[in-house]
Image (tube, rainbow, N blue to C red):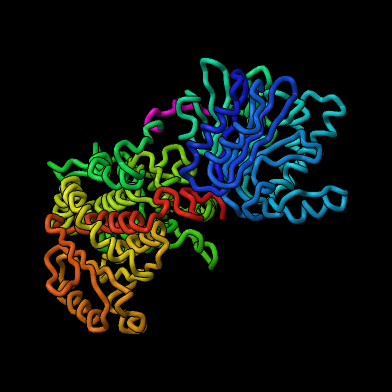
Amino acid sequence: MCGIFAYSWRRKDADSILLHGLERLEYRGYDSAGITVGNDAHVVETFKAVGKVSALVKEVSKKRPSDAFYQFGIAHTRWATHGGVTVENTHPHSDVENRLFLVHNGIVENHSDLAERLSSAGVSFYGQTDSEVVAKLIGKETAARLRTGSPDSLLEGVEAVLPRLEGAYALVIMHADLPGELIGVKYGSPLVFGRDTKTGDSFFASDVQALAGYADQVTFLDDGDLVRIKPDGTYEIRSEGFLVSRPFERVETEHLKTEKGNFEHFMLKEIFEQPKIMKAVFQGRVDFEHLALNAAAFQDLRDIDIERVKFIACWTSYHAGWAGAYAFREYAGMSATVEIASEFLNSPVRVDPKILYVFVSQSGETADAIEPLKFIKEHGGKTFGIVNVVGSSISRLTDFGLFTRAGTEVGVASTKAFTAQLAVVTLLALFYAIKRGEDFRKYRSALNDLAKLPEVLQSVLSSSGEIAEVAKELAKRPHLFFLWRGSMLPIAAEAALKFKEITYLHAQSMPLGELKHGTLALIEESCPSVVFLPDDALFAQNQSSISEIQARWGKVLAISAKPVQNADWNLVLPSAPGLTFAFAATVAGQLLAYHAALELGREIDRPRNLAKSVTVK
Ligand code: G6P
């Protein structure tokens, strides 16, 4: 999704700082990139390129005069929403005089009306974006104030336009004639303001990770915040026109640790990190020796009276929520459901004080999840966040929460963040099992299983080579099914999603029992299936479904807890008892997708059209 990076003011290589910032934002997914830089001689230059940041780097080195210096600027990676992937639509966007420039994340919903009014006043547009309309508007207001000599022209120009914008935005704005000055505004889309306290330099970024090593202090802006960086390096933060102060935090150097190491791709590295992450998830939260749960969040929940649970999330995180709903029913005996966040408000909603609304999100910035979260809060609902990115919007908006502690995830296809989510939703369900005095034997056996997870996942990783062999076979076929019964639903759905995301092959998850009610018509030799078989009461039934598929010439990969005699390929995960099978099968599904995508030569870490964090609705 779109990324923002901005810098002001004491160094003379703003262009290289901005390009480096954009490289750090690349993992979010984008299709074009651009920067505008300026200096105290009122010179500004804009460079844009369709494609990767590397193309922009080439463009800058080709066109930048060798003796040029740039002291401030704004940068952007664009993931197209309004208007095609063209140089014209690439940010930064400018006003009619080419003096004001801005970068924008989010969507301004009333841009057509605003554009129409500007057009009738004689303004023409070079592109199709909503962002360009905002640039034209702020440019007009600022130019009028500059003519009066107001020292606050840019601030006043921005403040005159903001009330006219409907939708979500994070904006950073600069003006050629106001060197060093930057204005950052957040409403609905994330924006972080950072300072290097040693030099007094200032930064903005859509993602705190991009600021590591540049800023030592950051503040996560609230909706409605406006930050003005002045040419003397000082800054002010305003909200609704008043000066406010916001707490600053240190930037964790952990954010810098995003190298691939010896792995060919971030995704593979992240898959292999999972045993370690399981340990991090449980650290200080689970006392396996005394079978106790100690997380602070559980203390918070102790006095809260709820009867039901509703998970709300988007795709991968939605699958984790689905697993959470199963776990609540299984261990806590509670009614629990999962809802697709982007659909939550599309039918009548009654916020119920007896429901705990659990938002699951890797990034914590997914606009489709933030909207229902705000709605539920406004209507008095109790909200809980299961989020990976510390300081993100969802982690700050929810009443209670647990971080997933998966560390920075760079691969667009989520892997380690998902298994961490699975572990956390399970812990939450187990907390309610104890709180409600449910079957202690089940609770104990679940905790004993969780204790084995690092080891279990390690053993699946050691089968990577074996999985690669089957993946090569599956990659030859255009369609495949991921089939399940019972609690394997979210695991199969996630495996199918992973496969689609990075192989670009069609994969669909479906209940084994439903196959014969229609989909069996698609089964033939070129349409294989992956079937998940934990060692449970459904094993024999699952095995006979495999024979039904094979009778139609369909080939079957069985991912199972014990050998499946009739499978064409069988990946047996014998060391994954009980609850751990779901985690082990998840990792197997991730490796299957990875190796198939590798075989097909796909761009694994940044699959086409996808973004890591989707901050627009
Ligand atoms: C995007 C990503 C998915 C992710 C979903 C939810 O679509 O490409 O991988 O599952 O957003 O993201 P979240 O950050 O809320 O977990």
**In the image shown, does 460 or 512 lie closer to the viewer?**
460
Residue 563, percent across and down?
A: 12, 66
Residue 221 seen in the figure: no
Vertically, is 353 above or below 48?
below
Is residue 380 within the magenta segment? Answer: no
- Total number of numbered discs in the rendering: 0
Query: Is residue 250 found inside the magenta-colored segment of the image?
Result: yes
547 horizontally vs 28: left or right = left
Residue at x 30%, y 53% (from the top left corner): 422
- Most extreme residue toward the top is 198
Which image quadrant is residue 239 in? top right
The answer to which of 290 and 472 lies nearer the viewer is 472
In the image, residue 346 sits, relative to residue 611, either above or below, namely below
- The structure residue drawn at horizontal position 55% and vertical position 30%, both measured from the top left corner, is 193
* 393 with respect to 94 (left or right): left
x, y percent for residue 553: 26, 81
Quadrant position of residue 206: top right
What residue do we see at 20% from left, 58% from top?
A: 581
Give coordinates of residue 273: x percent, y percent: 27, 42
Magenta segment boundaries in residue numbering:
246-255
- Viewer-proximal residue, 5 or 440? 5
Quadrant of the rendering where the C terminus is positioned: bottom right
Image spot of residue 281 (x, y percent) = 27, 42
Is residue 378 at least partly visible in the picture?
A: yes
Above or below for 446 versus 240:
below
